[in-house]
Image (cartoon, rainbow, N blue to C red):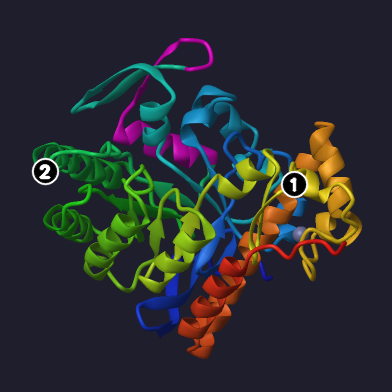
Amino acid sequence: MSAASQPVEFGFQLLGTDGAARRGRVTTAHGTIETPAFMPVGTAATVKAMRPESVAETGAEILLGNTYHLMLRPGAERVAALGGLHKFMNWPKPILTDSGGFQVMSLAGLRKIEEKGVTFRSHIDGSVHFLSPERSVEIQHLLDSNITMVLDECTPHPATHEQALSSMELSMRWAQRSKDGFKKRPGYGLFGIVQGSVYPDLRKRSAEALASIGFDGYAVGGLAVGEGQEIMFRVLEETVPHLPADRPHYLMGVGKPADIVGAVQRGIDMFDCVLPTRSGRTAQAFTARGTVNLRNARHQDDPRPLEEGCPCPACTSCSRAYLHHLVRSEEILGLMLLTWHNLAYYQRLMAGLRAAIEAGSLEDFVAGFHETQAGGDIPALG
Ligand SMILES: [Zn+2]
């Protein structure tokens, strides 16, 4: 690259569609992301039990970092002084950070939500902190996050129409303040978050309010909070058509493989979820044939790999019997290998979805996905 090369602009290119599903590419200062994409969760500047090089080897092109955790420990100013999150955690590819709002609601003690922001106690040491839309955007800037999320109030489920309306309206005022506080840089973007619970009129109003403010991408928030897959898919069908089509669509905190497949069919481009990593640490493996519990005694004499054809080290260098032994012995290597496998499986699923959209064969791909999942794990011989 020449010294005179132009800085990369943040952008989204729509490369193709199949029904409502989209094949796209997000461009950032730290590289491109092929969509539909899955973002592994790197809560505390690490994808638990994985080296960043290994995460990249699974095919991941972007990680999610958690503002709440990083602001408390090690602190955003410290990360900035050390050169930003990419350098700090040795992940040179794109990073998206959440706003901290969701964790404040779910982890912090003694929180108080006001118009100006939210005051809360750290779950680590009880110290008092304040997070406003402006401060959240500033922290994410200090972290050097490529995709900054606006601070919003994740409306609890269930909520009445009245509760969902007032919560959504607060989030829209905070979205405007986040936009005002965001420092634009080439290759960095700011995403708005649609709220409105399960109410189509509120989701539409929220999407339109965000579009009129103008963001680099649009997330659907407040789902995967216990409403169930059927309601989630319905809300997506009622929400995604109101999002600007020339920007990426991100479904926050989702999900199981079947949730992701269904959301891609409904026009979602980006996902994040702790499921593959968290399940890897509790002996649950995701495969094309559904979930496999390596703790189960049926694996103790099984010389086969966890999943035939998977290029991850758990499958190429270990038997199910060995993985079972590691899990039962509570060896650290067991959770490392299963985390690696699960991330590899999720990235393989996304690659399959992308190829199917490109080929115009998503319907067949989805039918095959469900058929193989329903078929279940093949039992060992003998
Ligand atoms: Zn594997």
Tag 1: residue type? Leu
Q: Residues within 10 Å of mark 2 (few under 14, many from 20)?
A: some
Q: Position of residue 79 (x, y in %)?
A: 59, 32
Q: Above or below — where is 284 with respect to 210?
A: above
In this rendered view, identify the residue nearer to me: 352 or 245.
352
Quarter-wise, where is residue 153 in the image? top left
Quarter-wise, where is residue 232 in the image? bottom left
In this rendered view, identify the residue nearer to me: 333 or 307.
307
Tag 2: residue type? His
The residue shown at (58%, 56%) is: 62
**Residue at the disc numbered 2:** 161
Query: Which quadrant of the frame does ligand 1 lie within?
Result: bottom right
The residue shown at (54%, 82%) is: 356
**Residue 110 shows in this picture:** yes
On whether residue 124 falls in the magenta region, the answer is yes
Q: Secondary structure at mark 1?
A: loop
The region drawn magenta spans 123-143
The residue shown at (44%, 42%) is: 98
The quadrant in which the C terminus is found is bottom right
**Residue 8 shows in this picture:** no
Callout 2 touching callout 1 (CB < 8 Å): no
User: Residue 102 shows which numbered tag?
Assistant: none
**Residue at the disc numbered 1:** 294
Spatial CA span between label 2 and label 1? 44 Å
> Viewed as shown, does residue 141 lie left or right of 205?
right
